[in-house]
Amino acid sequence: MAAVVRAFANDGEFLEYIQATHFDYFWYGANPANGLIPDRLPSPSPCSIAAVGFGLSAICIGIDHGWITRTQGVDRVRTTLNTFLQGPQGSGASGTIGYKGWFYHFLDMNSGLRYTSFNSELSSIDTALLLAGMLHAKQYFNQQNSDESAIQTMVDTIINRVDWNWMARGTNVLSMGWQPASGFLASNWIGYNEAMILYCLGLGAATNPLPASAWTRWTSGYAWATYYGQSYVPFAPLFGHQYSHCWIDFRHIADGYMNSRHSTYFENSRRATVAQRAYCIANPLARAGYSSNVWGLTACDGPAGYSARGAPPAQNDDGTIAPTAAGGSIAFTPEYSLAALRHFYTRFRRSVWTAYGFRDAFNQGEQWWGPDEIGIDQGPIVMMIENYRTQKVWRLFMQNPEIQRGLERAGFVPLSFMVPRLEPLFQQSAFSLNWEALAGRTYQVEYSPDLAAWFESPTGQVTATNSAAGWLDNGPPATSALPFSVAHRFYRVYQFGPP
């Protein structure tokens, strides 16, 4: 399969193929008897519960695209949920799936019990990613029949038995995990990294929720910085800027910290991605092959083993590129991520493309091509392409009362929106947008073909210099096509910072 050359009529057809192939990892790579999904393939490996979370969301996406039927999806989701609902919980070192409502990071693919060969920890972040997939499935399978009602009930039962205060040890900060023999891990989750969704879920829990002060403790670790012209809260590997966004729509909300910086977490991830691409183009360590279309550093395998690679600042940068880094950022930087994915597919297809999508990573300087696909790589590619194309994952997940409560308790508030005045410029086949503004404030233009899916223009960020601001839509790269070449186009503008 890797050697087959495919031509694509347009970007949509290409992305559909990329999504469908990565979806196959979760559908055909799973154990159909219990729904568990391996950490990696084709190398033998245990189940990764985070991969199961991504897989549950992938099933919902797969139904919408017609890759599987709804009946198939319902059966697989019920099987998966039953594994986690019925699996024994307890403090023993073996024979259990979890404890206090939390689950072990790695499980045996057949028995569904703790994978003792890895001395697997009870993992707070991996449990959160699993729960996120479950909550997405709960909102997706909302038909009033016995099978889908059972899914909703099972998810509620699993979610509500998680003891958040226990993992926080009665404080306002969550431990990274727990071991049967030694107790809680010494490290805690303090921002900024992939655990934002963990705190949002814990704050919104219906039972044993975290105290509201947990969010202040989380943000106490932030350090605003500027790299390659981008100012943001950094975390060098890109996965830390992606995982929470696979489910939570941060585009139009901000907490106290981001409001004070006139930004959002979505914008923060966009800037982090732009800065990392700029780092790879600058290539200060002279790694082989880096370019405007060969970028993407994150946690992945490499010639010397698995490592959390990232930049800026440079962290374990040995020249290893992971396609999931660019693919998982497509909702933030579609113009850059799509170009990178096309380049990886056309230029390196024979070495990195498989029946389950892109391999984990490659290193041109060492002529090393990763042997495996990894579940937590494939998942963000499937999900973030969907969020970029339809935003349906975001829309469904944000309906969960747990996430609504969590965001509210963390202090998130909506950004201010305004409807711009439109002036057609027939000679230029363009539209001029104008709106009242506050001097010094930054605004973002969005456009939509149908008032359902909204897209940020890559050129549509405007900083006002006086009481009025404006922007010109003259087609690519501002928008997907000339405004006069489409049947409908709607616009809206939102303002960064407090009202």
Image (cartoon, grey):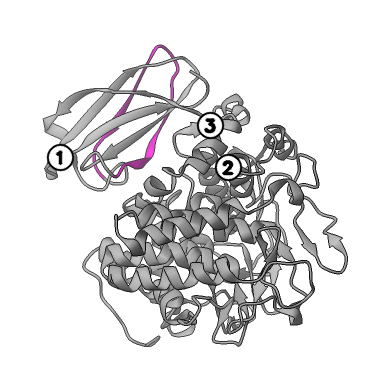
Give, as a three-letter code, the residue at label 3: Ala
Q: Give SS at disc 2.
A: loop
Which of the two residues, 195 or 465, is positioned nearer the viewer here? Answer: 195
Q: Do labels 3 and 2 touch, CB within 8 Å? A: no
Q: Residue furthest top?
A: 467
Sort mark 3 into few (<14), some (14-19) or many (20+) by Cα contacts within 10 Å.
Answer: many
Q: What stretch is highlighted in magenta?
A: 453-475
Q: Give SS at disc 1.
A: loop
Separation of marks 1 and 3 at Cα, in angstroms: 30 Å
- Asked if one can make out residue 253 in the rendered structure from this viewpoint, the answer is yes
The image quarter in which residue 146 lies: bottom left
Marked residue nearer the N-terminal end (3 or 2): 2
Separation of marks 3 and 2 at Cα, in angstroms: 23 Å
Which residue does the numbered mark 3 point to in the structure image?
A: 254
Give, as a three-letter code, the residue at label 1: His
Looking at the image, which residue is at 61% across and 25% down?
260
Which residue does the numbered mark 1 point to in the structure image?
A: 488
